[in-house]
């Protein structure tokens, strides 16, 4: 667990150790999820993350790509 400060613009800094651990580089997109008890930040899935993911069916892959395209619009 880490404690960070929120600026008046609503910005914060994710600690370096966590950025490195989760591959959060400059420009990375994060999903912001309201859990009901707090806010969860999760690295957004990109098309690059889907490369080699043959464990998914064609329909699952199509749904995921459609979701990503809607987010990017």
Image (cartoon, rainbow, N blue to C red):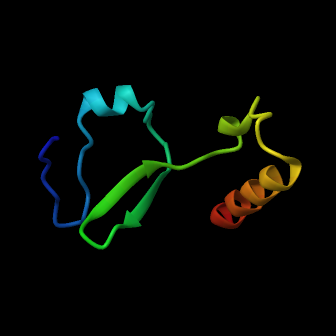
Pick out the residue farthest to the bottom: 36
Quarter occupied by the C terminus = bottom right
Left or right of 37 in this view: 19: right
* Residue located at (74% from left, 34% from top): 53
Which quadrant of the figure has residue 64?
A: bottom right
In this view, the residue farthest toward the right is 58
- Left/right placement of residue 63 relative to residue 30 reads right
Above or below residue 17? Residue 44 is below
Q: Quadrant of residue 8?
A: bottom left
Q: Position of residue 41 (x, y in %)?
A: 37, 53
Callout count:
0
| Front-most of residues 66 and 6 | 66
Where does residue 18 sit, x and y in percent of width and height? 30, 33
**Location of the N terminus (image quadrant):** top left
Above or below, 1 relative to 67: above
Spot occupied by residue 13 in the image (x, y as percentages of width and height): 24, 45
User: For residue 14, what is the image quadrant?
Assistant: top left
Rendered residue at 23%/66% (across/down): 9
Measuring from the top left, give residue 50's x and y in whole percent. Answer: 71, 38
Q: Relative to residue 45, is residue 39 drawn left or right?
A: left
Q: Residue at x 77, y 43 (%)?
A: 56
Residue at 66% x, 61% y: name it: 72
């Amino acid at each position: 667990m880490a404690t960070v400060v929120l600026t008046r613009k609503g910005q914060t800094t994710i600690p370096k150790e966590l950025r490195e651990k989760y591959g959060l580089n400059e420009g990375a997109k994060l999903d912001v999820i309201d859990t009901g008890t707090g806010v969860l930040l999760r690295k957004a899935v990109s098309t690059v993350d889907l490369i080699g993911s043959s464990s998914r069916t064609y329909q699952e892959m199509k749904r995921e790509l459609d979701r990503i395209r809607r987010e990017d619009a």
